[in-house]
Structures are given as C-alpha cells and as structure tokens.
Amino acid sequence: MKTSSEEIIKLSNDRIILAGLLILVLGFFTWRSDLGVAKPLLVSSLRMVIQLFLIGLILVYIFSINHPLLVLLISLIMLLVAGREVSARQKYSIKGLWSYGIGTCSMFVSSFAVSLFGLLAIIRAENWWDPRYAIPVLGMLLGNTMTAVALSIDRFTANVWNDREIIEARLIIGETSRVAIKDIVRDSLRSGLMPVINSMAIAGIVSLPGMMTGQILAGNSPNDAVRYQIVIWLLIAVGCGFGSMIAVKMVSNKLFDDRERLRIDKISLKKP
C-alpha cells in the first residue's frame, strides 16, 4: 500500500552536504595514503551532484511536456555520453573514430532494443515513450551495459596486444582468426558479464537494488517494487550480454583483414 506524500522524508541541502563531508574525509585519507585517487574521487563526486541536480530539473520539464521527441533527444544524449565513457576507459583503443563508434553502436543496438521490448511487451504503459518509464529504464540499461561493454573491450584489446605473437603463430599454422582468439573472446565476455551476474546473485540477500530501494523510499508497495526490479535486472542482463558480444565482435572484425591477418597496427596505447 502506498503511503501519503507527507510520510516521505525529504532531504534538505544541509543533509546532502553532511553526506558530502564523508567524501571529504575519505578523500583526505586516500591523499594521506598516497593512493592517487583523492582528486578523481572528489571530482567525480562533485560531477555526480551537479549532473543529478541538472537531470532532475530537465526531467521535471520533460515530464510536464510529455512529448516523444524530448524523450528521444535525452535518450540520444545519454547514448552519446555513454559512448564517450566507454572510449575513455580503454587502455588499448582502436585507432580512429571506431574507438568511439564501437561502444556507441553496440549499446545502441542492445540497450535501445531491449528497452523498447521491455516498454512495449512487459511494462505496457499507455504510451511506450512515457518519460516516467522510458528514461529510467533506458538509463539503467545504458549504465550497466556501458560498464559491461567497456570491460569487455578493454580486456579484449589488452589480451590481443599482449598475446599478439601467440595469435600470429596460430594463424601461421592455419588456424582461422576466430579459432585463434576464441579463448580471448571468452575471457573478455566473462569479464564484462561477471559484474551483472554477481549483482543478480546477491540481489535481495546482501543488497537491495537501486530501483527497488527508490520505489520503497517513495512509498510504493515492496511487492510492486520487487516485480519491477526483477524485470529490470533481467533486461539489464540481456542488454549487457548482447552489448558485450556485439562490441567484441566489432573490435575483432577491425583487428583482422579479409586475409585473416592480425592488424595490430590498428591498436593504439593511450597515454596514462
């Protein structure tokens, strides 16, 4: 049973600042320990706060307008930013625009297709583009798929670079490129999928997932929150799986030519 809005505890700015003080304490200890993460921690925290406040203002406007073009626009922006993040997280990247395009394309195919299926076939809102459903669902899928794709590509390109001599030796003895990198592909996909697999394994026992927690805090019935969270986790797993597979396949296609030769020259090492 949903509680009244008066029963929902609202967090004032001073309470948010109090939570931020904990980050400052953590930043101080990481700085004293010379871990090299104090600045990224503080910058990421500040960036997170600004981004969430901005998206809150934007969503209020989008919800009031309730127009599909605005939903598509914000979805496109989310996709492009996610594609940039995937590219930025690579130690070994594909040269050229494909460094950005592979992650973006794989997330577009997987996350958008799975989100659309979830909205049309499972949630079945009156309008599939209803921003109350479309934006949160796509956001959760994109966020998790982005991590899976980034991990898979990073592991794949790093392993190909490190094992390039072994791969070329296997190609010389007559193996196809698909066979020569089979173990690398398997390891890369496992790397991308294990976070979501582990998260699903402990959901409801060790941790309460984000969407479920948010709905409960908003006053929704725990039973309804559980059903939504189950659907979201299953959609996330599918999005991560297909996104990682598509990304690794696209990278492998770029690293081998029509004559089954390894084009290691297409990989560039990013400067630290």
Image: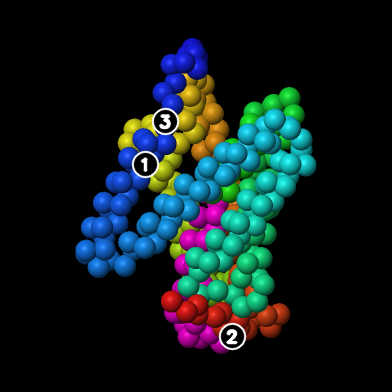
Badge 3 local density, few (<14 within 10 Å), some, or many (20+)?
few
Q: Which mark is residue 11?
A: 3
The answer to if 163 sits in the magenta stretch is yes
- Whether 215 is drawn above or below 161: the answer is above
Quadrant where the C terminus sits is bottom left
**Residue name at image x 25 percent, y 68 percent:** 34
SS for callout 2 = helix
Q: Does residue 32 appear to the left or right of 251 in the view shown?
A: left
Residue placed under numbered mark 2 in the picture:
265
**Could you say which quadrant of the image residue 267 lies in?**
bottom right
C-alpha span from label 1 to label 3: 10 Å
Question: At label 1, which amino acid type do we have?
Answer: Ile
- How far across and how far down the image is residue 15, in percent? 36, 35
Which portion, as a residue range, is magenta?
144-173
- How far across and how far down the image is residue 220, in percent? 50, 20
Q: Are marks 1 and 2 in contact (CB under 8 Å)?
A: no
- How far across and how far down the image is residue 253, in percent? 65, 72
**Residue name at image x 26 percent, y 51 percent:** 25
Front residue (pair 134, 180): 134
N-terminal of the two: label 1 or label 2? 1
In this rendering, which labeled residue sits more in front, label 2 or label 3?
Answer: 3
**Residue name at image x 65 percent, y 71 percent:** 98
Question: At label 2, which amino acid type do we have?
Answer: Asp
Q: Are marks 2 and 3 in contact (CB under 8 Å)?
A: no
Residue placed under numbered mark 1 in the picture:
17
SS for callout 1 = helix
Q: Are marks 1 and 3 in contact (CB under 8 Å)?
A: no
Question: At label 3, which amino acid type do we have?
Answer: Leu
**Residue name at image x 44 percent, y 21 percent:** 8
